[in-house]
Amino acid sequence: MSLLFTDARLIDPVSGTETRGELRVVDGRIAPPGPAERVIDCAGRCLAPGIVDWGVKVGEPGERHKESFRTAGRAAAAGGVTTMVCRPDTLPPIDSPERLEQARSHAAESLVRVRHMAALTRERAGSEMAEIGFLRDAGAVAFTDGTRVTRDTRVLSRCLTYARSLGALVVGHPQDPGLSAGTCITSGKFASLRGLPGVSPLAERMGLERDLALVEATGARWHADQITTAAALPALARARAAGLDVTAGTSIHHLTLNVLDVADYRTFFKLTPPLRTEDDRLATVEALAAGEIDVIGSFHTPQDEESKRLPFEVAAPGAVGLQTLLPAAMRLVHAGHLDLPTLWRALSLNPARRLGLEGGTLAAGAPADLVLFDPDAPFVLDRWTLESKSKNTPFDGARMQGRVIGTWVGGTRVFDRDATRAGA
């Protein structure tokens, strides 16, 4: 079926423009102007490329009770996410073509597109390189051990060298593992008052400096998954100036929250890396606006109630974010930090380009992965209304703005807010 979206605010991250107009879809792809079988009146609301969410944790295999591809897909569709780029930190990790194929078969349950990253080392243990070549042939879009930083520099160097020979992308987690071990909060006065073991922001800078030195030595393609401190930004800028093939991302939680939100040991705010100071948050936002940070991700990490209802120091880190990514990101727009095209460059265009995926654009011929949303619609978030199996969101009870009205994947509608409200 051909579709025609009319009276839409078209958010185009490629041209960096927002225009009022129409968009036509034919056979699941964006098409030049013309007639259509069905017309959708957008009523002046925003129509943008679907979000490509880089760094999603799904509990299959091993932790299906926390999140399945079915529930993650529903949450993604409700949040305007049309592609989930999933992490390999499963039980067991995705470190072989057989495990990748198992994950891909389970992902068929999802309403949205799913692409997978694979582990960089076997079992994510940091001692032996994973089957990078075979995994890449099997469909892995990048390689990472996630938050398990490889301590053995020689092993990491070999992995980067081999990845360079294949043109594979390696994703690093900038953090010095020695300084980070046993900590749960960013060090400072607030951590001391709460009696919690803190990690210095310099741990991020030190980890980043080491990884960038190896990237320079090997020539590998590399992406920092989460840059969250002002101290790390100069090293990133130097790497870019030197011509290294380096990009960087950050978490929506680190862009919109700070360490004070932990308040009285609220474990929904325990993340990896931990929330930073307000100065660090603002520096990260400024770097994003300037294009020094390329990607925003939800870093969706579902945890069950039992793992969160514990003392802060021992509670599991992480928060769900697929369904809250868009309204949380709208805080940056309403605060005047970013305009919508710049925001969508980080949410959709840049991750698609870096990973070699289609999407992130409204150009003719691109897949019709689209999100229709009202950027100003206010609501109070109730975590029990989230589609995810786990409900560990730091935004529970928060006043937010930005409602997804509809989501389309390949021209097929996978979320309809009006139908959802009617069903309720």
Image (tube, rainbow, N blue to C red):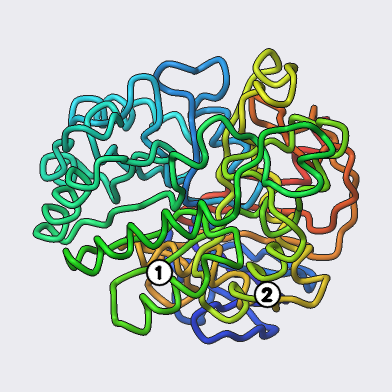
| Left or right: 217 as drawn, with respect to 403 | left
Answer with the quarter of the image where residue 326 lies. Answer: bottom right
Q: Name which residue lies at 88% across and 45% down.
A: 398
Work out whether 252 lies above or below 190. below
Answer with the quarter of the image where residue 303 lies. Answer: top right
Q: In the rendered image, which quarter contains the C terminus? A: top right
Of circles 1 and 2, the one toward us is 2
Q: Amino acid at mark 1?
A: Ala
Front in this rendered view, residue 190 or 397: 190
Front in this rendered view, residue 362 or 266: 266
Q: Which residue is mark 1?
A: 366
Q: Name which residue lies at 78% across and 74% down.
A: 44
Front in this rendered view, residue 362 or 103: 103
Q: Where does the image place residue 89, in percent across and percent down from the top left?
A: 40, 31
Q: Which residue is mark 2?
A: 340
Q: Where does the image place residue 4, in percent across and percent down from the top left?
A: 59, 69
Mark before the other along the chain sequence, 1 or 2: 2
**Which type of secondary structure does the marked residue at label 2 adopt?**
helix
Q: Where does the image place residue 337, in percent across and percent down from the top left?
A: 74, 76
Q: Amino acid at mark 2?
A: Leu
What's the distance in space between the residues labelled 1 and 2, CA to CA?
Answer: 20 Å
**Which type of secondary structure does the marked residue at label 1 adopt?**
loop
| Left or right: 194 as drawn, with respect to 368 | right
Q: Where does the image place residue 353, in percent across and percent down from the top left?
A: 37, 68
Answer with the quarter of the image where residue 185 lies. Answer: top right
Work out whether 248 lies above or below 180. below
Is residue 230 among the parts visible in the rendering? yes
Work out whether 61 lies above or below 408. above
Find out whether the residues at labels 1 and 2 contact each other: C-beta distance under 8 Å.
Answer: no
